[in-house]
Image (cartoon, rainbow, N blue to C red):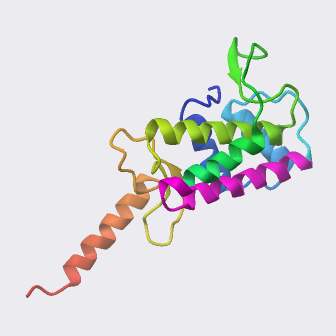
Amino acid sequence: MQLNPYGADVVNFAAELANRPPASADELADRCRTAGLVLERPVEPSDLDQTLAVIDAWTNVVDATGERAKAELVNEMLARSAAYPRLTDHAHGWHLHYRDDLQSLGAVLFALISVGTAMHLVSRGMDRLGRCAAAGCGTIFADTSRTARQRYCSQPCANRDAVRRHRARQSTPST
């Protein structure tokens, strides 16, 4: 898999990082490789710090209420990570980068997550990032469903919530 700023991969990766932040530069490197990101330079502790900062900014986008608020936050992220787009063939054939060459991993992730989130929101809908509706969960997800109605982070959370609602109805006396 190649992280594609036009697809769902990057917002799903951002959600994964937000839900389970990496604890070290080595863990960040491993998770990036697992996600299909080509690492061109060694991963430093400063990359972890920058990645955690972008995830904090991204989480603010997820939690923002209203389209304008989300757009303003994404625009701030885009402005902070801006570079002119360029074609490159460094790893997987020709593809587009939204960053300068030879940037640190933290800067690369900032650009990928910013552009990927912008593309996700404008192509799928401004309300397609959210938190699980199951009581006590709060896990972040990127809604990539065809129906645009995702409310839960996973099927187990949806099932638990359905059982909870069913039991609540059963325990309520009929009038």
| Quadrant of residue 147 within the rendered picture | top left
Q: Is residue 122 left or right of residue 83?
A: left
Residue 122 visible in the snapshot: yes
The residue lying furthest to the left in this view is 175
113 shown above or below 4: below
Q: How many marks?
A: 0
Q: Is residue 88 left or right of residue 145?
A: right
Q: Which residues are magenta?
A: 45-69
Front position in the image: 171 or 136: 136
Q: Quadrant of the C terminus?
A: bottom left
The chief SS type of the magenta part is: helix
Residue 52 magenta: yes
Q: Which residue corresponds to the image point at 22% horizontal and 83% vertical from the top-left?
A: 171
Residue 74 horizontal/vertical position (percent): 63, 48
Q: Which residue corresponds to the image point at 60% horizontal and 55% vertical from the top-left?
A: 61
Q: Which residue corresponds to the image point at 85% horizontal and 27% vertical from the top-left?
A: 40
Residue 109 visible in the snapshot: no
Residue 16 horizontal/vertical position (percent): 62, 49
Q: Quadrant of the N terminus?
A: top right
Front position in the image: 128 or 28: 128
Q: Which residue corresponds to the image point at 78% horizontal and 36% vertical from the top-left?
A: 108
Residue 140 horizontal/vertical position (percent): 55, 56
Residue 116 horizontal/vertical position (percent): 61, 37
Q: Is residue 170 left or right of residue 81?
A: left
Front position in the image: 152 or 87: 87
Residue 109 magenta: no
21 shown above or below 106: below
